Amino acid sequence: MGGKNVAKKYRSTKAGNINTLLVESLDALGQVRYDADQTIKGKTLGLDLSVVLHKALGDITSALEFQIQPPVPVSKIDDVLNKMILLFKRCEVKLLACTEGKHHKYKGRVNEQRKKKQSGVQESVEKLVEQFKREPSSKLIDEIKKQMKYSVYVREDILAHAVDLLEENGIEVLSAPYEADFQLVYWELMGITEGTITLVE
């Protein structure tokens, strides 16, 4: 990719026939002037929505909202998606978003380990909250905030909210039969998309 406004936060790479637009951070999705780079104007790009949502939930505001159920933690998600939508519309880029489908059996062990870790962290957070109620301290607050972001995951209500937001803005969202990253590669190899956006951090 070219364009001096894009260079610091975005870089492109090519692996085989796959063109990847590497985004340095979640916030960069809503900060960089895409219209400064004419190489992506009018293109169709694939986006792994699940990754964006997972990263957004790791934000401390989202993590706090996640713990206060039943409200859906949408502050950071709405902020990131709305800015991204406006920027891509401005440079006439068509987004095709992909969500996770059934987890492939080859990633079964990894997914089980992830769920176990999330569950363990959530239990730890709940214990810390109870401890804080008995013995309030700034140290406990810091520890709770630190652990909260590791207990979040993309719940169905969170995904539904994000899908509604994208579809209301004319962005098609499709579910992969298995992992979203596999599907994004397939789309590009088949010529359905001309590039794939992924987050570096």
Image (tube, helix red, strand yellow):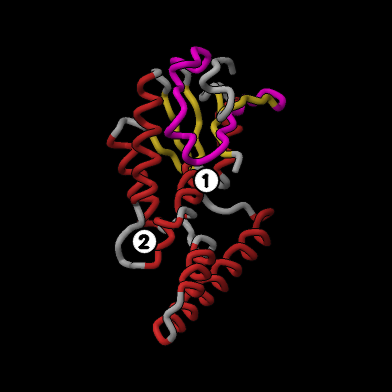
On residue 1, the disc is none
Judged from this view, the residue extending furthest toward the right is 16
Judged from this view, the residue extending furthest toward the top is 38
Bounds of the magenta segment:
15-42
Locate residue 96: give its quadrant: top left
Point out residue 32 in the picture as x, y percentages from the top left corner.
47, 27
Residue 123's place in the image compared with 82, above or below, is below
Residue type for callout 2: Glu
Q: Secondary structure at mark 2?
A: helix
Q: Residue at x 61, y 62 (%)?
A: 114
Residue 100's place in the image compared with 118, above or below, is above
- Frontmost residue, 158 versus 134: 134
- Magenta includes 25? yes
- Frontmost residue, 18 versus 130: 130
The residue wearing badge 1 is 51
Q: Residue at x 34, y 44 (%)?
A: 78
- Frontmost residue, 61 versus 73: 61
Residue 118's place in the image compared with 47, above or below, is below
Residue type for callout 1: Val
The quarter of the picture where the C terminus appears is top right
